[in-house]
Amino acid sequence: MANAPATPRHGDDGIPGTGLSGLLFDEEYEETHHDIRAVLFDPVFDPREGLSPRESGQLTYERSRVLHAALERPVSMLDRPRRLFALAEWSSLLDPAVFSVLLVHYNLCLGTVLDLGAGRDDIKDHVEELDRLDAFGPYMATEFGYGNNVAALRTEAVYDAESEVFVLNTPDAGAQKFMSFGAFRDIPKLAVVLARLKAGGKNHGVHPFVVRISDGDGLCEGVRVTPCPEQPVQGVDHALTWFDHVTVPRRNLLHGDLGGFSSDGAFQPGGGNLRRRFLRTMSRIQPGRLCVASAAVGAGKASVYTALRYAETRTTNGPGRGDVPVLEHRSHQRDLFPALAKVYAMNLLLNHAKREFLAHSGDTAPDDLNHLISVTKALTTWEMSEVAGISRERCGAQGLFRVNRIAEYGSLLHGLVTAEGDNQVLLATTAGQLIARTDPDRHPVPPAGPADRAPDAEAADGDGPDVHRELLRYREEFLCRAARQAMAESEGTYFDAWNGVVNSALDMARTRGARIALEQFRAGESSLTDAGDRTALRLLASLYGLVEIQRDAGWYLAKGLLTAEQVEGMPAAVDRCCELLRPHARRLIDAFRLSPELLRAPIAFADYTAAFQRRVGALGPDADRPHPPGP
C-alpha cells in the first residue's frame, strides 16, 4: 500500500509555454527537453523505500536502462551536446544516482572512446557495446591517494612490444582507482582507465585505455574490487579498484593524435609535451562540468519549486489575520525568494556557458571559455547547495522525508561540489590564470571613491541591477589587480606569493561569476515580450544583485562605494523586493516545467495532506472516499 503510485501517469506537462520558460530552456524545451522529461513518468521512477544498498543500486541500473532505451543512442546524443546537458538536468530529479551512472557512461567513458578513437575500425566493437548499453562504462581516473590531482596518478600501463600488449598495474594502495562504479560484479563493465603509459623505458604521460572490469559473471582476471562505504541517497556501486598485472590488448589504447605505433611495433608519442597530451586526454572534462552544472540547476529548481508550492498552501497563524499561507510571512519570503533568484541567476549563467561552449565546438577551447565553464560549475553547485539547504529547512519536518525529494537533492549537490574538479581547487586554478594574464590592462579598474550610483532602498524599483553589476565588476577587477601586484612585490617563493593572495583570488573569481550572471539577467529581460515576465525577471535581478552586494557590504563601504546609510538600508531593500515579488512567485516557478505529478513529492500538491496520506497508506475517516489525484 505504501508504495502505490500517488498520481496518474502521463508525459504531457500540461503547463502552457511562457516567455520565462523559453528563457530558462534557451528556447529548446520542445526540441531538447520534453521527451526526456516524459520518460520520468514511467512507474519505474516511483519512490521505493526500505531498499538495501544493493537493491537501491540495482534499481539505479534498471532505471538507467529505461532512460537509455527510450531515447536516442548515446553516440547520437554526444553529437548534440544540448541533449546531453538536458539528460543531466532531468535524470537527477527522481534518482540522483541515475545521473551519475548515465553521464559517466555517456560523456566520460563513451565520449573519450569517440574523441580519441575516432575512425578506428579496430575498436568498433567497444563503441557498439557501450552504445547499446550491453556494458556500463565507468571512468577510472581519480586515485585513492591523489584525489583531483589526475596528472600525478601512478597506475601504470607498461607496453610489451614483443607480445603487443600493455600490462596494467596498480603499484600501491594509494594508486587504487577511487569512486568509480565497479562493486557489482554481475553487471558488465567496460571502463576507460587512465594510466601512465610506459614504453621503451620512457614515461609518455597519462593515456586512456579501454579495460574490461567484469563480464556479468564476475570480475575479469587480475581486477580486484573493494566496495566503498555506503553513501547517503546515492545508490551507486562506488569502489576501490586494483589492477594486478592485467593484460590489455594494444588496440585498447585510445591514443588519438597523442601517439601511435610504428611498423616495428614500437610506441611513438605524438607532438607536444606531456601537459598538452594530458589535456587532450581529458577532453571530456569541459562538457562534463556543464553536465554537472545542469544537474545542479535542475536540483535547485526542484528544491525551490517544492518549497514554494508547499509555502503557498501550508497555513500558520498570522497576527491579527488568523491562518495565512506561510509564504505571506516576510521572514519566509526572505529565505525562499533569494533562493529563487539564485536559481534563475545560475540557470542564465549556465545557458550562457553552454552557448559559448557550442560556439567553439570542435575547436581548442580558448582560455576565456575554460574560465567561464569552471566558474559556472563552481558557482552553480555551491549556490544550488545553499538553495536546497534553505528550501529543506523552510519545509520543516516535511523536508526531511526522502519522498519530498529535497533531502536527496541536498545530498546530490554535496557530491556535485566535488565532481569534475573540487570547486575550491577549480576556482583557485581559474583565479590564478586570470591573475597571470598577459593583458592586465584590458579592463582597467577605476580609482577608488564613491560610486556615481549605488544600491539604495529604491534599487528594486529603479536601475538596481545595473548598479549592482558595476559594483561587482569594480570588486572583481580591483581584487584581480591587487592580487597581481601583491604577487609581483612578494620576496618569497612563488608558492608563498600565491598563498598570500589565494583567498582574495577565490573571492575575485566568485565575484566574476556573479557579475556575468547579472549581465545575463539584463540580456534575458530584453528578450521577453510579456510585460509581466519582464517585471518579474527584473525584480529577481534586483534581488539577486542586492544579496550579492550585501554579502560583501563591508568591503564596498570601506572602499567608499557605499555609504553607511546605504548599507543599513539594504535589509529593507531586500524586504521591499520580496514584497513586490510575491504576486509573481507562481509565474516564476511554473516556468521550470515541473509538476507535482512529475516529482511525486506530496508537499508539492495543492492538497498536500491527502497526497501525503496516500503516499504512506494512512487511513482516516474518509478512507473509502476517492481523493483527487493532484492539485
Image: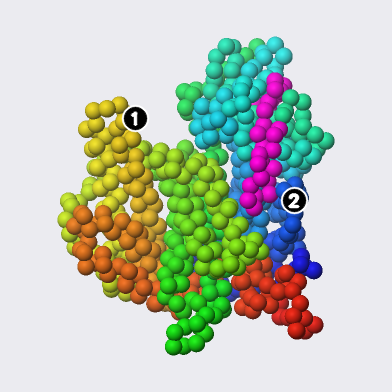
State the residue at coordinates (47%, 23%): 273
Q: Quadrant of the N terminus?
A: bottom right
Question: Residue flagged by tag 2: what amino acid is it?
Answer: Ser
The chosen color scheme is rainbow
Q: Amino acid at mark 1?
A: Phe
What numbered label is drawn on residue 495? 1
For label 2, count other residues whose C-alpha is less than 10 Å away and answer few (under 14), some (14-19) or many (20+): few
Residue at 53% of width from left, 74% of height from top?
311
Q: Position of residue 124 (x, y in %)?
A: 72, 34
Q: Is residue 377 left or right of residue 449?
A: right
Q: Quadrant of residue 582?
A: bottom left
Count of marks placed on residues: 2
Of label 1 and label 2, which has the lower sequence position?
2
Give the residue drawn at x 48%, y 58%.
386
Comparing 430 with 535, the one in front is 430
Q: Is residue 35 left or right of residue 357?
A: right
Asked if residue 45 is positioned above or below residue 323 in the image, the reply reads above
The CA span between labels 1 and 2 is 47 Å
Question: In this orientation, which residue lies closer to the viewer: 30 or 293?
Answer: 293
Q: Please determine whether, in this image, residue 615 is positioned above or below residue 233.
A: below
Residue 204 horizontal/vertical position (percent)? 54, 20
- Residue 109 in the image, given as x and y percentages of width and height: 64, 38
Residue 594 place in picture, x, y as percent: 60, 67
* Span colored in magenta: 225-253
Looking at the rendered structure, which numbered label has been put on residue 586? Answer: none
Mark drawn on residue 52 = 2
